[in-house]
Amino acid sequence: MAATVVDLTEAQFSEASSPEHHPAMERPWRPRINPWIIAMTVTLATFMEVLDSSIANVALPHIAGGLGATQDEATWVLTAYLVANAIILPAGAYMTTFIGRKKFYMICVALFGISSALCGFAPSLPILIFCRILQGVGGGGLAPSEQAILADTFPPEKRGQAFAMYGLAVVCAPAIGPTLGGYITDNFDWRWIFFLNVPICLISLFLTSRIVEDPPYVKKQVELSQKGGIKLDFLGFGLLGLTFGSLEFILDKGQEDDWFASKLITFFTVTVVVAFVTMIWWELKQLRDGHRPILNLTLFKRRNFAISFVLMFVLGFSLYGTTILIPQFVQTLLGYTAELAGLVLSPAGLMMMCMMPIVGILVGKIDPRKLIGYGFVMLTLSLVTMHTLNLGVSYGYLVFVRCFQASGIAFLFIPINTIAYIGVKQSENNDVSGLTNLARNIGGSCGTAFVATMLIRRTAAHENNMVRNLTSGNQAFMNQVAKLKGMFGGHSGGNPMTGAGSHTAQAYLYNELHRQAGMLGYLDIIQYLAVFCACMLPLLFFIPRPPKHASPSAGH
């Protein structure tokens, strides 16, 4: 009997969340405070969180040395954060049902700030990794919550401008992170990377408590969930964590363990497949039974959302993939320092900061599909231009190519988010923000794993092809060894392969061959990314034409 009562109340909750039964809940609501003040308030913490996901990358050698760990062990500092982040991203909307969005957001900010302080004080690597997990849990709820807050705070015709501010946080922060992280670790102590978050969290908590408010429909959801006695879906949470946690582990550690040559990676791959299928079945069952599912899979019935999800994945793939690719290229092949490598990316961040507000204004006046098409064309062309890189490339040309790429990325983030919300009920804004951020997060992890894997394998393939020519039967090779042998203190006459200086000459040539093979490996990856981005253009023809100034309930 008790179970029946719970089922009925949960069915009532699901029914009450629908605008068809409560039209008043879908009436336009506007906050008491100026929307732009709210936008700046919530963007503060989100920028800090996204920045923290990349700022620790360059500090890993310092962290390993300071805590007496190896470089491989120190990478768990990054992996732990990403795994926790991926788990909480899609679950944020579900949690707001029970405690409200403002309270959930403030809890995430507080947890992020406390765990950041604990990371700074961590005396050992295991404690630091545990604190990074807590930090990832807190940080994972910030970006989706901000996006949902902006979607509710601004009217549809101004939503693009609001997403421009949000875009500054999630797109520019990864570009600024390595530079800032390099500066802090070189001039101060790596612990200040984490201590830096604490004052920002305190400011964010104070402003959020005074400025941000929950819209009526969120308050109604919380009230209904409390009256209905709805309990947390522990099985759903377990499946969610197992799926995305295992996937993030595979992507982060796959290349390091040689993918399926490792039994551990194979085990987690099987775990992902089984957990994912079980999770989909369970979530659909929850929906059929009238319960509130953790993942709102009904959103994928809408073409505009489903395609936006794919496009956001590709955006994350390309953005994070090239953000890893360029610094690695200039450090390993051109001899740049970590700080100088970060300065290659920073101007692109400034470019996006200038472009985002312009795109935000254009979204309200031009069909978002056209803006997305322009963005992918520019992104593809920038990658084609990047294919001209060589071992003698200048710093100025690298900055130009990266800024060229940034000009295309700026035209993708805002329009894709705008299209994702078209035809969505106001009560589903949290679900949309959680899933689109999950797509970007997983896309970024896949892009990073792709770059790491392909770079090693393509470099090895090119090296194997090129080393075949380094034989005594190749007269050009023998002549080059003879010339270098003379430079290194030997005699250019006689057999080039023997005598003083011959081994040094051959080692020099092999080192140059290795650099050339690495350069070709980078060019292969850039070529693959260009083709990948170009293949997204046909998808735009399948997105329904968005109505001008579409309301959140358009299409219902």
Image (spheres, rainbow, N blue to C red):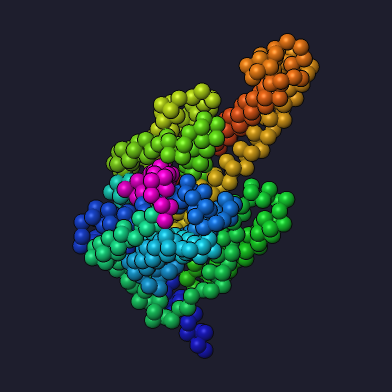
Q: In the rendered view, does 481 fall on the left or right side of 126?
A: right
Q: Is residue 179 magenta?
A: yes
Q: In the rendered view, does 255 fall on the left or right side of 192?
A: right
Picture coordinates of residue 149, whole percent (x, y): 33, 59
Residue at 31% x, 54% y is 44
Query: How many numbered discs, if any?
Result: 0
Picture coordinates of residue 523, whole percent (x, y): 57, 30
Q: In the rendered view, does 168 fall on the left or right side of 262?
A: left
Residue at 69% x, 33% y is 461
The main secondary structure of the magenta stretch is: helix
Report the quarter where the C terminus lies. bottom left
Q: In the rendered view, does 193 fall on the left or right side of 68?
A: left
Residue at 72% x, 30% y is 464
User: Is residue 357 shown above or below 517?
Assistant: below
Picture coordinates of residue 6, whole percent (x, y): 48, 82
Segment tinted magenta in the rendering: 165-191
User: Is residue 451 shown above or below 39?
Assistant: above
**On the image, which quarter does residue 363 sit in?**
top left
Using the image as rendered, state which of residue 164 and residue 457 is in the foreground: 457
Using the image as rendered, state which of residue 180 and residue 314 is in the foreground: 180
Q: Is residue 85 magenta?
A: no
Picture coordinates of residue 9, whole percent (x, y): 44, 80
Does any portion of residue 233 appear in the rendered image? yes
Does any portion of residue 248 appear in the rendered image? no
Q: Residue lying furthest right in this view?
A: 473
User: Is residue 302 shown above or below 240?
Assistant: above
Residue at 62% x, 25% y is 512
Using the image as rendered, state which of residue 12 and residue 282 is in the foreground: 282
